Amino acid sequence: MTLMEQAQRGVSSPVIKKLAKEERINPDELLSLISTGRVVIPYNPNHAPSRPVAIGWRMRTKVNVNLGTSRDFPDLQSELKKLKISIKYGSDTVMDLSTGGDIRKIRRKLLSLSPLPLGTVPVYQAAIEAISKRGSIVRMTEDDLFSVIESQAMEGVDFMTVHCGLTLKAVERLKKQGRIADVVSRGGAFHLAWMLHNEKENPLYEKFDRLLELARRYDFTLSLGDGLRPGSVLDATDRPQIEELLTLGELVQRAREAGVQAMVEGPGHVPLDQVEMNIKLQKRVCQEAPFYVLGPLVTDIAPGYDHIVSAIGGALAAAAGADFLCYVTPAEHLGLPTIDDVKEGLIASRIAAHAADIVKGYPGAVELDAEISRARKKLDWDRQQKLSLDPERFAEIRQRRKSRTKACSMCGEFCAMKIVSEFLNGGEADETCG
């Protein structure tokens, strides 16, 4: 039985009990949410991550870090360092998007070392192998793609991005739309090229039952990808995007009927005034399936700072109901991220997730802010450092600009906290004013 089927029969497990405790929810309530598809737990038994997570309604907003090599930078050791950074600074999941070097070896090594659920985009490997064996992506066969999916499932991949909603009908809408950025999803581009060249329907859509059978057998979670996500704010919420979303909503229902966990991926580049509407639309069309968003990026003019752009959109999206944020680094649109880029992107995304959890009323979220605020009022720097998302950066800045007084060097003896505390409490007011 899959985890979803167990939940539908009311069968609990150590993983369910562990996550219910972490999420501050009754185990029976968590089972109910999993059984209806409103929460997913990416947990392939062949990997059995020691730090599993629950993603969806009433859960803490989760954050993902993308790892992976490219042909220009096929260095496994660098990706292993990025994995360590991701674990250290609180990522909930990681994805291996490798396209360079020995990608099987890289994935297996990451799986062996990752206590976090690990995801992939299997069409990457299938496309790369088609180029190697037959000279072109478009010569990939349906069996090539499904063979890769099964081999990755056997290795223990916990969730897979599969672009099942990119259909020939959606491609026709794309042609008529006249987008600025056309298709920016790499997996979406692979599928589109294959479909147009071979004049065939997307095999992941046409043979969706075959995909469901593999997902049931190995109990991995489907992450229904958005191959037509907008790559410019001017392309947001257009007909191709909505066409694909409607298809994904239908596939969510089919996955649930098969006892397979499924979440839905979303945009992309979206202006501020459309973020909330996109989240609510997805939740409605996809029957409250967990929503996994890239960003969203709310402007296109900030290369080098897209982690900030993404955090703005991510906070809005999660506050409106998105459940899972894929981080964006400063290197987005520019190159493969460095280790420092990974850290900056992760911290920015975690800030967005936490800010949204305060709005959602997630248990314990606002209490963290209250605790650090009390420490700030007391000028308790050790406590503030311990409670901060990045204690090392906290200490670095404090040391670099340390004050001669107990206050910070911005205000020093004119510290508002210190002055107001003295006068408000009446301790030294008479002596100071005279």
Image (cartoon, rainbow, N blue to C red):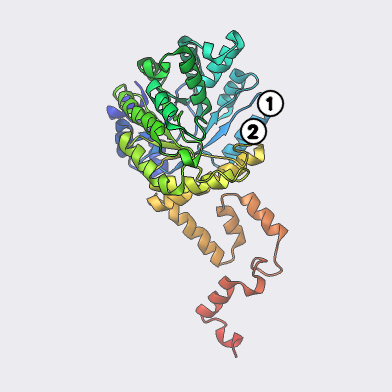
Residue located at (33% from left, 35% from top): 38
**Looking at this view, is 184 or 218 the one in front?**
184
Q: CA distance from mark 1 to mark 2?
A: 9 Å
**Is 190 positioned to the left or the right of 14 in the image?**
right
Q: Is any part of residue 224 visible from this angle? A: no
**Looking at this view, is 13 or 115 the one in front?**
115
379 is higher (above) or lower (below) than 261: below
Q: Which residue is mark 1?
A: 72
**Looking at this view, is 254 or 271 the one in front?**
271
Q: Is any part of residue 85 visible from this angle? A: yes
Q: How many marks?
A: 2
For label 2, count other residues whose C-alpha is less than 10 Å away and answer few (under 14), some (14-19) or many (20+). Answer: some
Badge 2 element = loop
Residue 261 x/y as whole percent: 37, 27
Q: Which residue is mark 2?
A: 336
Residue 95 x/y as whole percent: 53, 30
Residue 332 x/y as whole percent: 59, 38
